[in-house]
Image (tube, coloured by chain):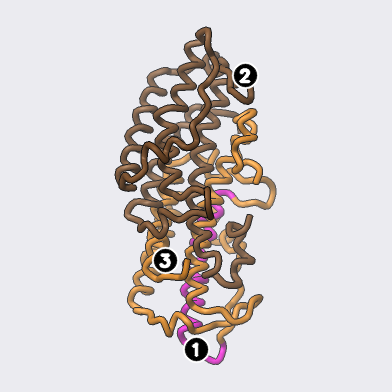
Chain colours: A orange, B brown
Amino acid sequence: MDFDLALSRSILERTPGTLSAMLGGLGPAWTNATEGPDTWSPYTVLGHLIHGERADWMERARIILAQGPERRFTPFDRLAQFRESEGRPLTELLATFAALRADNLATLAAWNLTEQQLSLTGVHPDFGEVTLRQLLSTWVAHDLGHVAQVARVMARQYRDAVGPWRAYLPIMDR
Amino acid sequence: MDFDLALSRSILERTPGTLSAMLGGLGPAWTNATEGPDTWSPYTVLGHLIHGERADWMERARIILAQGPERRFTPFDRLAQFRESEGRPLTELLATFAALRADNLATLAAWNLTEQQLSLTGVHPDFGEVTLRQLLSTWVAHDLGHVAQVARVMARQYRDAVGPWRAYLPIMDR
């Protein structure tokens, strides 16, 4: 599927509600569960998404749109959430994520991006030239990837509890 | 994690809201998207979950609890949704799933299952003896697996649109 701004927004605006529906009021047995050492819990994922709203997606979009002398992005800090969100209640993180996302989508709408602007480029620290269209596509896919991860991490807590059904549940091992 | 009835319910009761948040009002470009021939769209997954509420989970639980002369389960019909749900609006399927799930969870609560009952067994057509505890664990994991699938199927629609970021998005290829 080609990038489409309206279709992308329709996913981005749903993610906070999706995570609230999945995790709101859920106990720590699920929300702090991981897939083993150095893997993320649903709680950690939420902190990571919050950091992305604050520091990454819109910041990179602004660098591209400005077309200034320095179009190189700052690398993502994939551990920021361990400093920034640690210890805050999950309910607070859900609300923070929803508010930041709503603000960012309002800004995005106000930009009234043209096809020409969507083709502008910035410089990714690893990949080199990338377009605004690719950045926004990645924002969408990144959301969905983490929603899938949250579901998978929780499912795997029952890897043994399901007994022989494990063989019929691809989420457990793939 | 060991099976826990209350923790299991806390997932089962959230799944309809999760899918409504993800898919409610979303356009067919996302909800009818698949991963290729003979793979399922979010729409198909929803039909499958509805069939499970009607014909599978509680039916099998009843067979186990009855401990009658025939404790063998009827095999799951993994294609039932193509006959039963085809052509109905997604909004209707979301409402149907939510209503069926609520009814089933009310029945489950009314059973007041004991640890002894949770250890009773039925006969799976492929696996042989399975406990009610394993069946209920599988119901939970099955929900989460399909939530992850819905997110994955949608993410993959942007596999090309993300450009070089594909390399950093495990959901695209794993």
Q: Is residue A42 magenta?
A: yes
Residue shown at 53% from the left, 59% from the top: B156
Number of numbered labels in the structure image? 3
Task: Please identify the quadrant where the N terminus of chain B is shown.
Answer: top right
User: Alpha-carbon distance for marks 1 and 3?
Assistant: 23 Å
Query: Disc 1 versus disc 2: distance between alpha carbons?
Result: 65 Å
Amino acid type at mark 1: Gln
**Element on which disc 2 rests:** strand
**Residue A65: in sight, yes or no?**
yes
Residue in the image at 47% along x and 18% along y: B113
Q: From the viewer's perspective, is the residue at label 1 or at label 2 nearer? A: 2
Element under disc 1: loop
**Mark 1 Cα-neighbour bin, 10 Å: few <14, some 14–19, many ≥20:** few
Q: Are marks 3 and 2 on the same chain?
A: no
Amino acid type, callout 2: Glu
Q: Is residue B145 left or right of residue B25?
A: right
Q: CA distance from mark 3 to mark 2?
A: 47 Å
- Range of residues picked out in magenta: A41-70
Q: Nearer the viewer, residue A129 or A74?
A: A129
Picture disc at residue A67 = 1
| Residue A167 placement (x, y as % from top left) | 64, 35
Residue with the mark numbered 3: A8
Q: Is residue A80 above or below residue B151?
A: below
Towards the viewer: A88 or A103 = A103
Q: Main secondary structure of the magenta part?
A: helix
Q: Which residue is mark 2?
A: B129
Residue B46: image quadrant is top left
Q: In the image, is A168 to the left or to the right of A113?
A: right
